[in-house]
Image (cartoon, helix red, strand yellow):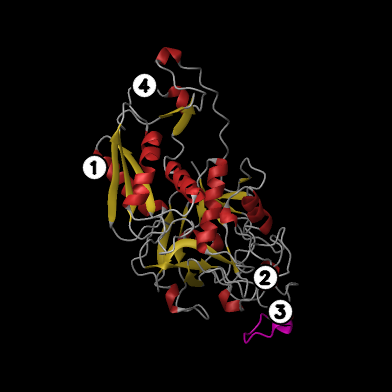
Amino acid sequence: MPGPEDIILEHHIELVWRIGVKPINQEDMERLEESLVSRLEGRVYIIDGGTCIWSEPDETHLVVIAYEGVVTWDLSVDPDDHRFQAFAVGYGSSWEDAEAEAVAKARLNMYVVGSGYDVMVRETWDNSAPVTAARQGQAGWPETAADAAEPEPEPEPRSIEPGTVFRDDCAACPEMVVVPAGSFMMGSPESEEERNDDEGPRHRVTIGSPFAVGVYEVTFEEWDACVRAGGCGGYRPEDAGWGRGSRPVIDVSWEDAREYVRWLSRETGEEYRLLTEAEWEYVARAGTQTARYWGESETGQCRYGNGYDRIGHAEWGFNLDPVSCSDGYVHTAPVGMFEPNAFGLYDVLGNVREWTQDCWNDGYSDAPTDGSAWRSGDCTNRVLRGGSWNGPPWRLRSAYRSGSWAEYREQGNHYLGFRAARTLN
């Protein structure tokens, strides 16, 4: 019987036409095909020109669902402005289980809003063959267990102790640090100076597991490596004449940021992503409860963050009150030029605002308390945190939040960037 990759490839043209989308050219068709196959999550192995899949013994059913009107990657559009939809693939021991898994994946990984979807494909396959070699990434899937190759030794596990700094096995991977599980009060107290109403109500959030976060904001050097490797949609943002290299990448949208972490995931086989808003504030505070991770007031800002200061005010003359010190930069600074917080993170407040996963909400009523992303609300707009090089002191606070259209690149003021996160398995 055919394996799931065969099923997907067999049906992908039918899928395209059934949802009323006409690819412009062969390149678009190939990109659609690649995206559909990628939904198989690394389970497919090519063996002697054929395909197979490893799965749990009871996983014999496959369902492909398509959501209406969802754009999840930037492909060309036809003259009628149709775009490809969001697909999700689910496996299970029954149609119901497989469909439920596909829906869950779509909501978790593709930020699908609403419940309108169509089941496009239902298929089953024979799962009786042994799978040991395929799971180990060997060159074949043996006909019988006796033919199975000896598994390769497991690599030494990487330490996930909090404070561990590491870089995954790719030249352009960002430097990451492990942060501990923990609990904190999210939002600002009503007594905090220059707070905004959308920073409340204050509530306790518990982060149940350690995770990794970028020591620095993603840089131009790291972004340009993604583009050279064929990722990030080929988009090469301008640097406003300030320089590339170790400066934080600017003029990137939420959609752009997601393309970058998806590329990292493909390169490394690990789960890279954006921080949730709760995770962002957790790592920004780094155990503190004050307005900023260096203290309650703006005093000392020029040691810890790049914001709108006296020399910036002299250069730009914005109608904003600058901090009363000089940090040495009139626009973005190379990452790591200021002192880190207690988790070892640099530039969490200042330099560039950082995209998070969450949909925008005007406050924290009914917000998740487990550190997960808030996937309801205004999902055309996403949450930004951290302030920026052109932000006055009241924006360089751990509780300060703002939002913007998910496709907005802000190519005028050059203050939108992001920081990568990684789930630890």
Residues at badges 2 and 3 in contact (C-beta under 8 Å)? no
Q: Is residue 153 magenta?
A: no
Q: What range is drawn magenta here? A: 312-323
Q: Between disc 2 and disc 4, whose residue precedes?
A: 4
Q: Give the residue type that dot 1 points to.
A: Glu
Labels 3, 4: front one = 4
Labels 2, 4: front one = 4
Residue 96: assigned label? 1
Report which residue position mark 2 lands on: 306
Q: Between disc 2 and disc 3, whose residue precedes?
A: 2
Q: Determine whether 152 is above or below 226 in the image.
A: above
Side of 105 where 161 appears, left or right? right
Q: Please tell me whether mark 1 sits on a helix, a strand or a loop.
A: helix
Where does residue 81 sit, x and y in percent of width and height?
42, 64
Q: Between disc 3 and disc 1, whose residue precedes?
A: 1
Q: Please tell me whether mark 4 sits on a helix, a strand or a loop.
A: loop
Report which residue position mark 3 lands on: 312
Q: Give the residue type that dot 4 points to.
A: Ala
Labels 1, 2: front one = 1
* Nearest the eye: 180 or 49: 49
Q: CA distance from mark 3 to mark 4?
A: 67 Å
Residue in view at x 36 percent, y 68 percent: 377
Q: Determine whether 336 is above or below 51 in the image.
A: below
Q: CA distance from mark 2 to mark 4?
A: 59 Å
Q: Give the residue type that dot 2 points to.
A: Asn
* Nearest the eye: 419 or 190: 419
Residues at badges 2 and 4 in contact (C-beta under 8 Å)? no
Report which residue position mark 4 lands on: 129
Q: Determine whether 26 is above or below 407 in the image.
A: above
Q: Please tell me whether mark 3 sits on a helix, a strand or a loop.
A: helix
Q: CA distance from mark 1 to mark 4?
A: 24 Å
